[in-house]
Amino acid sequence: MSLIKREDIMTRGKVLDLAKQVINGDRQDQYGSPEDSFSHIADYWSVYLSERESTHIVLSANDICAMMTLFKIAREANQHKADNLVDAAGYIGIWGDL
């Protein structure tokens, strides 16, 4: 069963068009390159999880893309918002670049 109601669907491809604008526009200017940003997040989350689980855990920038995509899917499952879909598509687009 789809998470999105038929009346909430944007025109075909609109989510992807918006995601391309987001990942190639102001966000990169605000947060730096996704490669650098996601690598930093991976480092921080690896330390946190390693300490919490008392074992050595190493996450990669690719893991962060996957986890952030899942985060947006979980939010979408709770409540439909177009930005959940746009952000999820953006994370997948970045993942493809990494």
Image (cartoon, rainbow, N blue to C red):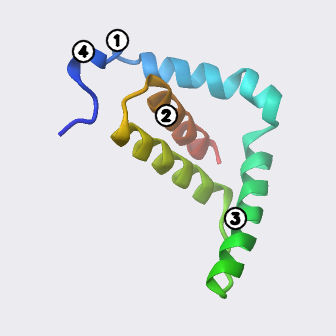
Q: Is residue 42 above or below residue 82?
A: below
Q: Which residue is mark 4?
A: 7
On the image, the x and y values in percent for residue 95 come to: 58, 46
CA gap between label 1 and label 4 equals 11 Å
CA gap between label 1 and label 3 equals 36 Å
* Between discs 2 and 4, the one toward the N terminus: 4
* CB-based contact (under 8 Å), mark 1 and mark 2: no
Residue beneath the point at 65% across and 29% down? 23
Residue beneath the point at 70% across and 64% down? 45
Name the secondary structure under disc 1: loop
Disc 2 crowd, CA 10 A, few/some/many (<14, 14-19, 20+):
many
Name the secondary structure under disc 4: helix
CA gap between label 1 and label 2 equals 15 Å
Q: Which mark is residue 60?
A: none
Name the secondary structure under disc 2: helix
CA gap between label 2 and label 4 equals 20 Å
* Between discs 1 and 3, the one toward the N terminus: 1
Q: Which mark is residue 89?
A: 2
Mark 1 or mark 3, whichever is nearer to me: 3
Residue beneath the point at 67% across and 56% down? 61
Q: Which mark is residue 11?
A: 1
Nearer to us in this view, 24 or 9: 9
* Image quarter hosting the N terminus: top left
CA gap between label 4 and label 3 equals 38 Å
Left or right of 66? Residue 45 is: right
* Between discs 4 and 3, the one toward the N terminus: 4
Q: Which residue is mark 3?
A: 45
